[in-house]
Image (cartoon, rainbow, N blue to C red):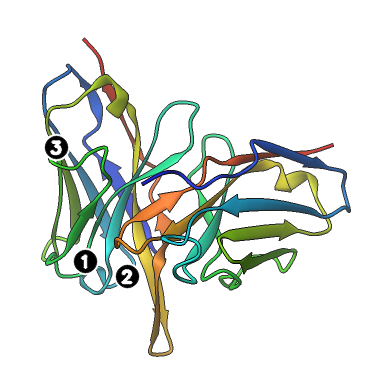
Amino acid sequence: QSALTQPASVSGSPGQSITISCTGTSSDVGYYNYVSWYQQHPGKAPKLLIYEVTNRPSGVSNRFSGSKSGNTASLTISGLQAEDEADYYCSSYTSSSTSVFGGGTKLTVL
Amino acid sequence: QVQLVESGGGVVQPGRSLRLSCAASGFIFSRYGMHWVRQAPGKGLEWVALISYDGSNKNYADSVKGRFTISRDNSKNTLYLQMNSLRPDDTAVYNCAKDGFCSGGTCYPHHFDSWGQGTLVTVSS
């Protein structure tokens, strides 16, 4: 049950787009289309942004989008806003019927 | 709307036990799997355990297997986490989370749909 690999930090200016990668293995990210993404502001509970690789729950801005290729999933945030500054985590359901998170990525809006 | 409220956290000595509870409301609790997820201070999220909607299936992270037990009481809309043989590296905020959602007759499982605010467990002598 090794954590998925995410970059520790990314940054971008308001209005720009950024992409956060999430690399796993053929037993998790590459096994199912059950990759999800979460946003966490300091001191707050995580919030679901994307489920099943590409799907947004109702109420989540369409500036957030997800994709996957092989064992690597990605979250793209377009039109960066100051309020997007937060920690972002990917997660995947695994072939062992467990779940695993990435180490998290801190997004700084310059 | 979905509400999940954790309780039972506190300071406990290494080797001792603690039981966490998660009171659920705003959805049909007995229809959904439930998770525990923890976050050590200043660290990332770590999945801990999952229980199926009826309690018949349970899965655990290797780091807690054999020490922690997840359970539920659907008559009380409550999820539990029994933590035994606690270690300092179990210190974390523990959150319960609802597994997926159902809409229009279709269910979308295997993600953390709604989260509680968490309860802090500190393991220290």
Per the model, the C-alpha gap separating discs 2 and 1 is 16 Å
Per the model, the C-alpha gap separating discs 3 and 2 is 30 Å
**Which of the two marks, 3 or 2, is nearer to us in this view?**
3
Tell whether B120 sits left or right of B41. left
Total labels drawn? 3
Rendered position, B38 above or below B14: below
Q: Secondary structure at mark 1?
A: loop
Q: Secondary structure at mark 3?
A: loop
Residue for badge 1: B52
Tell whether B93 sits left or right of B24. right
Residue for badge 3: B67
In the rendered image, residue B42, in percent from the top left (x then y), is placed at: 50, 27
Picture quarter with the N terminus of chain B: bottom left
Residue for badge 2: B27
Q: Residue at x 24, y 53 (%)?
A: B23
Where is residue A59, by image quadrant? Answer: bottom right
In the rendered image, residue B21, in percent from the top left (x then y), is placed at: 20, 45
Q: Chain of mark 3?
A: B
Q: Secondary structure at mark 2?
A: loop
In the rendered image, residue B50, in percent from the top left (x then y), is placed at: 26, 56
* Mark 3 vs 1, N-terminal side: 1
**Which of the two marks, 3 or 1, is nearer to us in this view?**
3
Task: Give the amino acid at mark 1.
Answer: Ser
In the rendered image, residue B56, in percent from the top left (x then y), is placed at: 11, 67
Q: Are marks 3 and 1 on the same chain?
A: yes
Q: Chain of mark 2?
A: B
Task: Give the amino acid at mark 2.
Answer: Phe
Q: Can you name the residue that lies furthest to the bottom here?
A: B105
Q: Chain of mark 1?
A: B
Per the model, the C-alpha gap separating discs 3 and 1 is 19 Å
* Mark 3 vs 2, N-terminal side: 2
